[in-house]
Amino acid sequence: MAGQTTSDPTQTRRSSRGAPTAWRPVGVWLARRAASAVFVLWAVATLIFVAIRLIPGDPAEAIMGGPGSQASAEALESARVDYGLDRPVGVQYLTLLGHLATGNLGTSYSLKIPVSEVLAAQLPGTLGLAVGAWILAWVVALGLALYSGLGGRGASAVGSALEIAAASVPHFWLGSVLVLLFSSAWRWLPPVSNGTVAGLVMPIVTLALPLAGFLGQVMRESMVTALNSPFALSARARGESEAGVVLRHALRHAALPGVALSGWALGSLVSGAVVVESIFARPGLGRTLLEAVTLRDVPLVTGVALVSALAYVVVMALSDLAERLIDPRIRGR
Amino acid sequence: MPVVPRPARPASLAASLLASLLVLTGCAGSGGPGGSASDDTPVEGGTLVYASGDAEPTCLDPHVGGNYPQALLAGQYLETLYTKDEEGKIVPWLASGAEASEDGLTWTLTLREGIEFTDGTALDAATVKANIEHLQDPDTASSTGYLAVAKIKSMDVVDDSTLTLNLSAPDSALLESFSMPWVAIESAQALERSQADNCAAPVGTGPFTVSKWTKQDSVELTRNEDYTVPVDGADHAGPAHLEAITWKFIPEAATRYAALQSGTVDMIDNAQPDTIKAAEDAEDIDHLDAPRPGASNRIELNSSKAPFDDAKVREAFIRAVDVQDGLSSLFFDTAERSYSALSSVEPMGYSDESAFERDPEQANRLLDEAGWTDRDSQGYRTQDGKRLSLTFPVSTNQSVPAEQSLFQQFQATAKEVGFEVKLDLLDLSSWYDVLGENHYDLVSAPYTKVGPDVLSILFHSSNTVPAPSGYFANHAQVKDKKLDALLEEASATTDADERQAKYTEAQKIVLEGHYLLPLYDQQNHFLYSTDLHDVGAMTAVASPTFHDAWLAK
């Protein structure tokens, strides 16, 4: 960070030559990414496999009707055989890895259908919600950063206050307040998804605002630091307007920490989705996870965790790429 | 039916925090004209949008597992051999009658003729036999319906409309059992499909059929155009007025009510006390209060270990806590206090207010007599250096926020006489684990069943023995030979008066033994738009049916 605040990446671009050999680092980069993705997925699958066995309770019971089932000993035994739970733990673990390697996520204990089918049905809902919220969060955060950067000391204080407020609001509180105001009291928006754009407004806003607050805070900080840097001073000396300094030079600095936080932002979106999908009764992976945990549906929990891990790996790779595009200093690395 | 899972509520805190705000907005939002349909002629067509706060079933066939959310939905597309009329009497429905032999071991069941399932197959004796066999098949994994038909040992098809049932022991609750949606009759041809297929779209004789199930969103139900035989007492014969029902799942109570207020949905269930209160002022919303049958909502006192192995300590706890105050402040008087082990809709329920009068002085005296005479620095009673401490595991899936708050109030009033109550909020699986390990002194567990036979499930000593999963229903762990004998005799008798006498005596033993603290009926509140007319028809387990309902819009 310290290096970024004193030199302008737009200036260093001029000195960066040797573009023809850029493919080699890209190949290495891709290979490294793929390897780390496999490692992350393996680690997640292993961790869950171990954790599930540490929790008291019989998975056969989860298969035969869930908590409090009155399944007979014979019924439980036949479920154990059907799902391979009667075999040694080592064999179960290797079987799991073998299935995962071939893309087989197993059968849901509670729904008795392939986990991949459940995930395929629920992924689009969560993806749409998360992408919508992510875009809105960036727009709001950048807007606040620009407003703070251009508006002077007073605007900076207002921006800061708004960001802190947004960042500290829990999803469940924000969602409930929005429902009470916009659906119960004023009746402007439907409280649950009804297939229209209006039904998407409150869920996306609920998920986006806290994230926008966090992103806005880090972006504004870097922008203010950048505006006080020597390169900003020299740009002004060249006759650049204040808006030009902000848009052409400082914005790049502002965006970098936001991009670096993408992995964390994804985590916030996924955990937020659990709450938001429940409040607004939206189908999606968050609610699937919540219900799978309640019913101790091991394959489904594992499936959702693996999809989240995969999303994390992809987002980290994309944010790494984005950082390289924004900041030429790290391109050669 | 022991399990009534409600979805976990990550935002239940928000709901309680915002309860007061809700009341305000409820008042502000009731501007519509409402109740404008002065005309009582039913309107044909339209789609009813229903929002359920219960957990989305994992299987739409109530034979599999068997919980209340399944019963709520199944009432629209499946029908039962018997049902309950408006006076609470058990009456034939798909059956035309049933007669028991002198010894009560053989029943002859006759069926209505000319009834067809929505797949075109006919209802006959072989179909009923296949259904009972389906319930008894371990692969079906039925928990509720399975128990209801447990005494049926074998069946003989006499002719198309006559079936003989051979029982292992007399069962005076058999017809009540046949009225429950968990024992509903499905097409035998449909039952032969894979369980996954049958779970996705069970086939019955009801006024609607399952046409589409979008997981986590809704179940689409379409009118059965060939529907002919409604239950006796229905307003009209023939197909339903409504063309379709969209059955949505909205787990959050505040969202559900907002959806009703904004007109996104026409009816909601699981209405919470704050919402019911708010809706009282809304002109365009009506309230339906339909207590569930079976047991009352009660706190059971685990008599199998100290300190509740001493009846004096049990009575002291019951006399110490203040229930009425909580019902006013937390339930806004939407729940009426119960003094019975059974629901107020059970005709054989026995109520004894005097057994539950609050009397802290008496509680103190009883604890002194029981030897809990010392107090520690925090004011709790002790005996031989051991604190008078009670563990109270609470299932967050089965207790609504208002009830959890009520238990917290009990904590405070019990402390006044020297009890320490340790509340432990748990998810459903952990809760069952704790019960299975006998790590509890107090517990509240709902149990829905039709008829007083629920007493045998809750208080017969044989039900202190856990199933392989650890589940058992006699949480008070009552082991009383005289009580066991009474319950067995009540189950075996074919005489209604004798049955009533036996069950009354059994209830007296349980109440006078201070094994439980009744709170209120199992709450079952619905709110609906005044555009929706002729609501109120119910299955035997108080879940609404919509054959007569119509929408004026």
Image: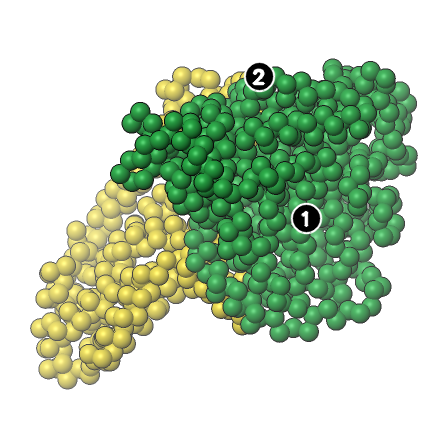
- x 27%, y 58%: residue: A259
- x 56%, y 28%: residue: B513
> Relative to residue B206, is residue B412 drawn left or right?
left
x, y percentage for residue B294? 66, 36
* Quarter of the image with the C terminus of chain B in it: bottom right
> Relative to residue A101, is residue B200 drawn left or right?
right
**Parent chain of label 1:** B
- x 31%, y 25%: residue: B384
x, y percentage for residue B408? 43, 46
The answer to whether residue B537 shows anywhere in this view is yes
Q: Chain B appears what colour?
A: green
Q: Which mark is residue B290?
A: 1
> In the image, is residue B89 above or below residue B506?
below
Scheme of colours in the image? by chain
- Circle 2 residues within 10 Å: few <14, some 14–19, many ≥20: few
**Parent chain of label 2:** A
Three-letter code for the amino acid on which mark 1 is drawn = Ala
Given residues B504 and A270, the one toward you in this image is B504
Instruction: Label 2: state its secondary structure.
Output: helix
**Dot 1 and dot 2 within a common chain:** no
Q: Chain A appears what colour?
A: yellow
Per the image, the residue denoted by label 2 is A74
Three-letter code for the amino acid on which mark 2 is drawn = Glu
Given residues B244 and A165, the one toward you in this image is A165
Q: CA distance from mark 1 to mark 2?
A: 38 Å
Instruction: Label 1: state its secondary structure.
Output: loop
x, y percentage for residue A279? 49, 55
Given residues B93 and B441, the one toward you in this image is B441
